[in-house]
Image (spheres, helix red, strand yellow):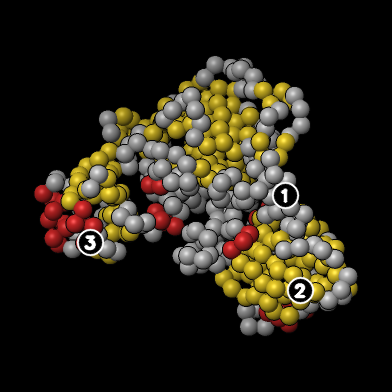
Amino acid sequence: MYTIFLKFLILALCIAQFSCKETEKRIDISHEFPFTSEHWTVENADGTEAEITIKEFKGKPGIALKASQIAYLKSGDFKNFEMEFYCNGAYPGLGFRIQDKKNYEYLYLRVPSSTKKDALQYIPIYKGSLPWQLYNYPQYEGKATFPFQTVGAFPTRIADELIDGKLNQKLLDQFTEQAISLSSEAEVIRGEESSGYIFDPHDSTALLFDKVNERIEFSDFRIWVHIKLEVVEDEMSVYVEDMETPSFIVTNLKRNTASGGISLISDFGEVYFRKVQIAELEEAKDTGTKVSSVALSKNYLTQWQLSEMFNKDTINFVAQLDSVLVNGKFKSIEADDDALVNISRFYDDMTKTVVLRHTLESDADRQVRLNFDYADHLAIFLNSEVLFDKGMDFQPPSTKGMEGRVFVDDEEVSLNLKKGQNTLCFMLSADNRQKFNWGVIAKLESLKGITSR
């Protein structure tokens, strides 16, 4: 569990900007929804109902959700709305425009990543998958500063002892001297440079540390955080502490704009929520057309033929591809507006594999570079020849993006196109380890002399 603190810790092209909308005022005053059975129901990961648990934390009462529990608001069907609440914990989340329990929009906070560019995460949830690797900065992750409480400080020389692994007894004694209680099971997980955190599995708590003013400070991130969310059409603004200036804006929410329900989510550890207030907003007025600051390059491969799902034969997958191409059923699909193909939009079984087929017609024999990235395992074929066969690594080398995130320039292969028609195939397997990511993005270096379809 503790490794998630770092692992969960697209493109700059096509950042959509709305200069064409005017948000109307509220059509309803804010309503507070107390945490009672009249307003909320709590479910465990297996769908069974759980009791509503109210606990006091840092002197204020709130609903306590254990890892993987979700609190659903019983009433209300919200499309455009403003929502304010307070939360506390490592990864508190919010589901909105819920169509059903496996299809909704999702925002969650990476509180331990305060001040970093991935402190806020937006993800469209299709069929229950949580593809955080596919939807990343700068469009779908944002920077935010969360309040921390400093609990102790040490001279910088202690940094040499803060190495990955269990705390030594000397450090445990030093923490005890500063009235910081840690068990013998506490471990150090280093981050960038002098930063990181100490995780104590005894009570599932963590202390962040970083170099500040020539000393190493240790902070408790379990502080009540004030959040406001404004959702109007396909735009979302997130406010953290400062209710006047948004910390993060998503201008192209990926799912449709249908109204839906609200949920409070605890994916990766216990979190608390309190004082949830919601007000409906008017629809936006269109005063022009949607403008994209940078148009998506035509070099991206956006038109694909998608096979049915199948179980991959990891030994004879080349022969299996030939069989799928001859006997399999394919349907035409289109990548989303930033060229990402999220297979969870179409299929829901994360134990399976699909083939994506694309035709490249060249007016001569030529070589062209293909840039791409993927999750979770990808084999690339050109005219049945294997060009690439690798799996995603959650702790990739420095040359492979950050934390395994999907960026189109992370990988490349050369395509030796023959004159005439060429068949490019991606055999893409889902992330069966984490049940989160199943997607790909690709573009050609040049379309000179090439017809892509």
Quadrant occupied by the C terminus: bottom right
Camera-nearest residue between 159 and 218: 159
Give the residue at x 88% y 70%: 363
Give the residue at x 79% y 65%: 358
Give the Cα distance between marks 1 and 3.
47 Å
**N-term mark: 2 or 3:** 3
Left or right of 1? Residue 423 is right
The three-letter code of the residue at mark 2 reads Gln
Left or right of 149? Residue 262 is right
Q: Position of residue 120 (x, y in %)?
A: 49, 43
The three-letter code of the residue at mark 3 reads Asp
Query: Can you identify the residue that label 3 sits on?
Result: 160
The three-letter code of the residue at mark 1 reads Leu
**Relative to 205, residue 280 above or below:** above
- Secondary structure under badge 1? loop
Which label is found at residue 296?
Answer: 1
Give the residue at x 44% y 28%: 242
**In this rendering, does residue 51 appear at all?**
no
Which label is found at residue 367?
Answer: 2
Give the residue at x 14% y 46%: 178
- Secondary structure under badge 3? helix
Quadrant occupied by the N terminus: bottom left
**N-term mark: 1 or 3:** 3
Total marks placed = 3
Left or right of 317? Residue 87 is left
